[in-house]
Image: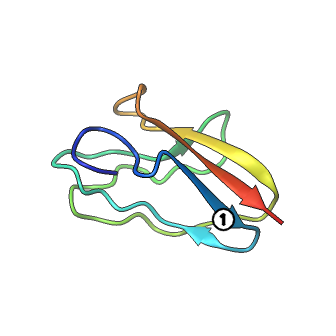
Amino acid sequence: MRGDKSYTPSSASVSVGQQVAWHNADSIAHTATQDGGGFDTGRISPGATSAPVPINRTDTLSYHCTVHPSMVGETRVKP
């Protein structure tokens, strides 16, 4: 997350078995919350990093910030 209320990068690729954490480089709190349920980092304070989220299956995981719903991103999970 960077200072203009966006995820950077807005799209990323990882492999099954990896863990993903979000770092908040903005001056306000954000979340990374999977669309339709799944993971939710909870509020990430400015300068903080979320707890790691384990990625256990191949999929495209779309997520958003519950504080700023227009802030969206996705992670493509490869085998």
Q: Is residue 47 left or right of residue 33?
A: left
Looking at the image, which residue is at 66% across and 39% down? 37
Q: Position of residue 49 (x, y in %)?
A: 35, 66
Closer to the camera, 37 or 9?
Answer: 9
Within 10 angstroms of label 1, few (less than 14), some, or many (20 or more) residues? some
For the view shown, which residue lies furthest in the left direction? 27
| Location of residue 64 with respect to 17 vertically, above or below | above
Looking at the image, which residue is at 73% across and 58% down? 77
| Location of residue 70 with respect to 31 vertically, above or below | above
Closer to the camera, 42 or 27?
Answer: 27
Q: Which residue bears the numbered disc 1? A: 14
Q: Is residue 16 left or right of residue 13?
A: right
Q: Is residue 71 left or right of residue 2?
A: right
| Location of residue 7 with respect to 57 vertically, above or below | above
Closer to the camera, 12 or 24?
Answer: 12
Looking at the image, which residue is at 60% across and 51% down? 39
Secondary structure at badge 1 equals strand
Q: Position of residue 9 (x, y in %)?
A: 45, 51
Which quadrant, please, contains the C terminus? bottom right
Q: How is the image coloured?
A: rainbow
Q: Is residue 79 left or right of residue 6?
A: right
- Number of marks present in the image shown: 1
Q: Amino acid at mark 1?
A: Val
Q: Position of residue 67 (x, y in %)?
A: 34, 33
Q: Position of residue 26 (x, y in %)?
A: 22, 50
